[in-house]
Amino acid sequence: MIAAMIVIFVLGYVLITLEHPLHINKATFALITCGVLWSILALMGNDPHIHDAIVNQLGDACEIVVFLIGAMTIVEIIDRYGGFSFITENINAKSKRHLLWIMCSLSFVMSAVLDNMTTTIIMVMMLRRLLSDQKERWLFAGLIVIAANAGGAFSPIGDVTTIMLWMDEKVSSVGLIVNLLIPSIVAMVVPVFIAQFYIKEGRMQTLTKMADKNPGLHDRHPHLSKAMLIIGISGLLFVPIFKTVTGLPPFMGIMLSLGVIWGITEIWVKRFKIDSKMGGRVSSALHTIDMPTILFFLGILMAVSALSEVGVLNTLADDMNTRIHEPVLMTSIIGALSSIVDNVPLVSACIKMFENMAPAGTVDPYLLTFVEDGLFWHLLTFCAGVGGSLLIIGSAAGVVAMGIEKIPFFWYFKRVSLLALAGYVAGIAIIYVESLLPFFLQAGEAVPGT
């Protein structure tokens, strides 16, 4: 039974990675894989508590799914009101190298609050108004992907994988920011610093006004666009504060924020007599959020949970500990794998594999790396997010940029992958050095006269 489940999971995984050649949405294979695995477990597992197990696993998965629905809806309603136009219309670059730093810095900051896919769409579309040379746009787009993935790695709401680890209490919001902010900046700065020497200097063209997703709403009510940008971003930033203060799961915070924004938009629609065709209501934004992506997450998380139920992931964790037994090397390998396969199921599997590694009262230095905010979880958060930049198909941001600008896979591999690798390795080194600082400080205090 276990062998059959592993084979089916691997087959489903391969089909997910072939989404674009097959022209079949990856949610299809994720849902089928989930259903087949749990069916095998129910028919062949002889577990009288299978119903309780699937309900418990579904509850964990749905926490993430509900959070994503709320966050994606808030981002969509900001976009509908033209809130992002205030960012795109106020960029003044003196040169192309200067533009590269501005674009990547903006991508880094935006993806810490928004998801990296939305950030990449906004920034890459703006490139079309700034650069006429296609090859230059490809290079800029590749660096934007790196910056967006790096920016999402240190924020608890910056990426799906950070959300998963944060909600599972493997990392805390404060611990994540304190320990990963500098490595994430390094992972962005190193590639951009190298790439700037590949760019020919030249004066910038005049930025033309971008067409908003809903120009009528933005043109008629520009004051609402700016207000919605502030309210929406504040609603997203409120979530980690809500979790820290109340101790409730993050999906409750995002639902509260969405409810407030929903109420505000309803008042605006009536107060300013906004035409229903302009899509100013949250109810209209809900129709356009990416539900296939939501269902993909649900399917793949439940598929991984099925393997967890039969003990496959615990066995893999034990084997990895026995053969490698080194957090830096283990997470580096996992991060490299995330450039080939989706990082969501990888992180989900790692959570299940290593969540019981550090029992209460443990004093073993190696096992302490698996406690909340331990070295292993910080490395995993960073590697799973930034590692996706190594290949253009390794992250949602990369796939989006590839689709918009038609960037060839091997062009990215030749021109950008080594840049991403340089930032990836540098960031891991910074995290490792940071983890050693407390030991150096203790050793310094122990030396007389220091």
Image (spheres, rainbow, N blue to C red):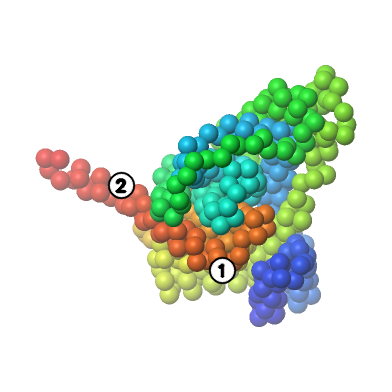
Instruction: Name which residue lies at 67% across and 35% down.
Output: 209
Check disc 1 and give the amino acid type: Phe
Give the percent coordinates (x, y) of residue 10.
65, 74
> How many tags in the picture?
2
Residue 30: tell me if it is visible.
no
Instruction: Name which residue lies at 48% across and 54% down.
Output: 382
Instruction: Name which residue lies at 41% across and 66% down.
Output: 329
Instruction: Pick the quarter of the image with the N terminus.
Output: bottom right
Instruction: Name which residue lies at 58% across and 31% down.
Output: 90
Side of 127 relative to 41 (left or right): left
Q: Earlier in the sequence, mark 1 or mark 2?
A: 1
Which is closer to the viewer, label 1 or label 2? Answer: 1
Q: Name the residue that disc number 1 marks.
A: 410
Find out whether the residues at labels 1 and 2 contact each other: C-beta distance under 8 Å.
Answer: no
Please name whichever residue, 441 or 100, is drawn nearer the observer in this view of the structure: 100
Please name whichever residue, 365 or 326, is drawn nearer the observer in this view of the structure: 326
Check disc 2 and give the amino acid type: Pro
Q: In this view, does 285 lie above or below 228?
A: below
Give the percent coordinates (x, y) of residue 208.
64, 36
Give the percent coordinates (x, y) of residue 181.
45, 44
Instruction: Pick the quarter of the image with the C terminus.
Output: top left
Q: Name the residue that disc number 2 marks.
A: 438
Give the percent coordinates (x, y) of residue 86.
63, 31
